[in-house]
């Protein structure tokens, strides 16, 4: 199962950089804005529905922790919540909620 997820990330994921202190990890992950309820602001209407541009979702096999910085999609994010998702006794992937920090200069 992990190999199939890694293959999907390699084909469809985005290139991201995870920074934890002095440690920098380059990997691939899925990054996307969190779908928002209609009354929440700020939001933007997209073909997928209404999204909150402040909160983003990270799904990847590289571990992330609270307060790590994730850079990808031309932006920088701060990890607010991170949870490992298990398959049996093994971590299959990490699910994290990110808050948009600032634009990344490339």
Image: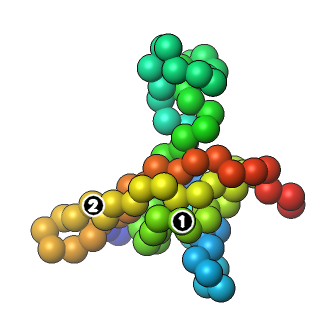
**Label for residue 46?**
none
**Label for residue 85?**
2
* Above or below, comparing residue 21 to residue 37 in the picture: below
Identify which residue is drawn at 48% across, 55% down: 80
Q: Quadrant of the C terminus?
A: bottom right
Cβ atoms at labels 2 and 1 below 8 Å apart: no
Q: Secondary structure at mark 1?
A: loop
| Category of crowding for the residue at label 2, using alpha-carbon neighbours closer than 10 angstroms: few (below 14), some (14–19), many (at least 20) | some
Identify which residue is drawn at 75% across, 51% down: 102
Q: Quadrant of the N terminus?
A: bottom left
Identify which residue is drawn at 52% across, 58% down: 79
The residue closer to the viewer here, 25 or 100, is 100
Q: Is residue 11 visible?
A: no
The residue closer to the viewer here, 78 or 62, is 78
Identify which residue is drawn at 62% across, 81% down: 21
Q: Position of residue 24 (x, y in %)?
A: 64, 80
Q: Is residue 19 visible?
A: yes
The residue closer to the viewer here, 5 or 18, is 18
**Label for residue 67?**
1
């Amino acid at each position: 199962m992990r190999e199939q997820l890694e293959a999907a990330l390699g084909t469809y994921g985005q290139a991201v950089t995870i920074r934890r202190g002095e440690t920098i990890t380059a990997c691939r992950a899925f990054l996307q804005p969190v779908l928002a309820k209609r009354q929440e602001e700020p939001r933007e209407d997209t073909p997928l529905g209404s999204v909150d541009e402040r909160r983003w979702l990270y799904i990847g096999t590289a571990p992330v922790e609270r307060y790590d910085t994730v850079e990808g999609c031309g932006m920088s994010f701060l990890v607010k919540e991170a949870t490992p998702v298990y398959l049996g006794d093994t971590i299959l992937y990490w699910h994290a909620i990110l808050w948009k920090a600032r634009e990344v200069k490339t």
